[in-house]
Amino acid sequence: MDQITIDFMDALLKSDRVKAKVLLKGIHEDNDIERLSNIFVLALEEIGKRWETGTVALTQLYMSGRICEELLDLFKNIEGVPKKEQPNIAFTVLHDFHTLGKTVVSLMLSFAGYTFLDLGTSSSIESLVQILKEKDVKILLISVLMLNSALKVKDVVQAINDENLSVKVVVGGAPFRFDKDLWKDVGANYTADNAFSCVKVLDKLIQEMSDD
Amino acid sequence: MIKKMNSMDRVLTALSHKEPDQVPLFLLTTMHGAKELNLSIKEYYSNSKNVVEGQLRLRKKYKSDCLVPFFYAAVEIEAWGGEVIYTEDGPPNSGLPIIRNLDDIISFTVPDVENSKALQKVYEATFLLKKSSNDEVPVIGVAMSPFSLPIMQMGFDKYLDLFLNYPDHFKQLMKINKEFCIRYANAQLKAGATAIAYFDPFSSSTIITPKQYETSGMPIAKDVISNINGPVATHFASGSALPISDLIVQTGTVGIGVSCNEDLSSLKHAFQNKITVLGNLNGIEMRHWDSKNAEKNVKDAIKQAAKGGGFILSDNHGEIPFQVPEDVLISVSEAVQKWGRYPLTWIDKDE
C-alpha cells in the first residue's frame, strides 16, 4: 500500500471524515476514479482482514464503509467506480431482519464495481427461486445471522436444483464463521468470511464461470 | 477428594475462586425443552409451566448446575409492544423494529415491567423453578443490557448509526433502557432468581472498540449492575472480551461468558481471582460432534481454565442451538463427570 492509502486507512479507522476527504483531494481534482476506487478497496480490504483477526471492531468496519460511500457521493462528475464484467448477481438475507452483514458487503461490492439485485429479506424459498429464474441470476449471495437460517440454505440449493437453474450460491454470516464446514453441509458453492473476501470470491467465481 | 456438593454450593465455590468438588456445568439447553416435551417451540414458550417442566427434565438428564427460566431475548421486545417471530428450529426472533426513526426515541417510555403480560410467564417460571430448586440449584434470570437491547429495538445497522452519530438520542435511549433493565432484573430476583445474566454482546470488542466500551458500554454496565439487587454475570454472546478485560472487571460483574474465538487460558489468566469465566464450547460446531469430540473439547476447556476455581463450563453463545443432538449433550455431561473432579490431577499428568 502507498502512503496515501495507509494514511487514508488510518483516517477511516479513526472515523475521521475530514482527514479522509483531505487525503483524497488531489485524486479528486484529477478525476482519477480508478485510483480512488483502488484506494478504497485496498484500505477496506485491510480493515476487513483486521476485523477477521479481531484487531478492528465492527463499528470501525461499518464506519469505514460509510465514509467511503459518502466520499464517493461527494466527488461530482464522476460516473462511479468502473463496472466489472459480470453475470447477474442477487443478494439476500435469509429468514431474519438482521441486515447489517448485507449492508457492509453491499458497500464493498459497489466499491469493487459489482452491481447486484438487492432482494432484501427472503422468507419464501419459492418466491426467491422464482425471482432468480425471472431475472436470470447466475450468482446468489446469501447472508445469515442465525444457525437455523444457515441450515435453510440447503433448501434453497435444493429448490434451485429442482428448477434446473444454473445458479452458484455464496454464503456468509456468523454461523459460517463458527463452523468452517457448514457451507459445504448446506450445499453452497463458496463461503466468504467477510465483506472483502466476498469480492475475492466473486472475482474467482466469475473467472471460473467464464472459463467453463 | 472433596465431598460431593450440591449445584448451589458448587457454583458458589467456583465463583469464590476456590475449587469445588467438580467443575460446574451450565448447559444452557433453553429451546431443547420443546423437544423434551414434544412441543413446537411456539407452544413450548406459550406458558411458564412448559418451560419449568422442560428445564427440570433437562437438568435431570444432563446434570447441569443451574436452572434457567429464560424464554428468548425477544420477550423483552414483546414487553415494549413489539412482535416476535417463531420458527420451528431456532430461537424466537424479534420482528420489525419498534423504533423506526429518531423521533420515536423522544416519545419512548418504559413499559410497566413488573406487570407486563409478556414478562409474567418469565416471573412465573422463575418462581416455580426456585420452588423446585430447594435452594440447591441456582436459578439464573436473564436481562439484555440497555446497551445491546437496541439491536432488537432498531435493527443492528440503524443502532450503529444512532450510537456513532446521534449522541443525544443515544443518551436518551440509554436512560430509558437502563430503567427497563434494572426493573426487569430486579423483578426476576424478586420472583426467585439467584443471579442475573446480563447479555451485552454490543459491548464486546468484536462490535465496538475498547475506547468506545470505556466511554459507553462499561459505565452503563457499572451503573446498571450497581442497581441490580443480586449477583450479575455478563455474557458477550460469542463476542471478544480479552482486549477489555481490565475494564470488564470494573463493572461489578461476578462472571463473564466468553467466546470460543479467544484463547481460554488467556481469558482465565486475565480474569483470574477477579471474575469467573464461563465458556467456551462452540455450540455451532457441537451439532456434528461425536462422543470423542465432546470429550476432547470438554477436557481441553477444563485443562485451560478450571484450575483454581473461577470457571464454569458452558457454551460460548449462552444458548445451545436447537440442532445439537441429545447424545452430544449427554457426552458433554459425562465428560465433565469424568474429567471435572477436582483437584484435576490428570492435568499435571498430561503435562
Image (tube, coloured by chain):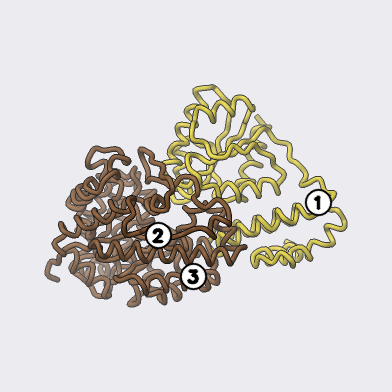
Disc assigned to residue B243 = 3
Quarter of the C terminus of chain B within the rendering: bottom left
- Check the image and name the residue furthest to the left: B3
Identity of the residue drawn at 26% across and 45% down? B47
Residue A39, placed above or below residue B40: below
Give the alpha-carbon distance from disc 1 to disc 3, as whole Å: 38 Å
Q: Which residue is mark 2?
A: B144
Give the amino acid type for the residue marked by disc 1 in the picture: Ile
Q: Who's brown, chain-wise?
A: B
Mark 3 residue crowding within 10 angstroms, few (<14) / some (14–19) / many (20+): some
- Check the image and name the residue furthest to the top: A163
Q: Chain of mark 1?
A: A
Identity of the residue drawn at 52% across and 61% down? B207
Disc assigned to residue A33 = 1
The first of marks 3 and 2 along the sequence is 2
Residue A67, placed above or below residue B82: below
Q: Who's yellow, chain-wise?
A: A
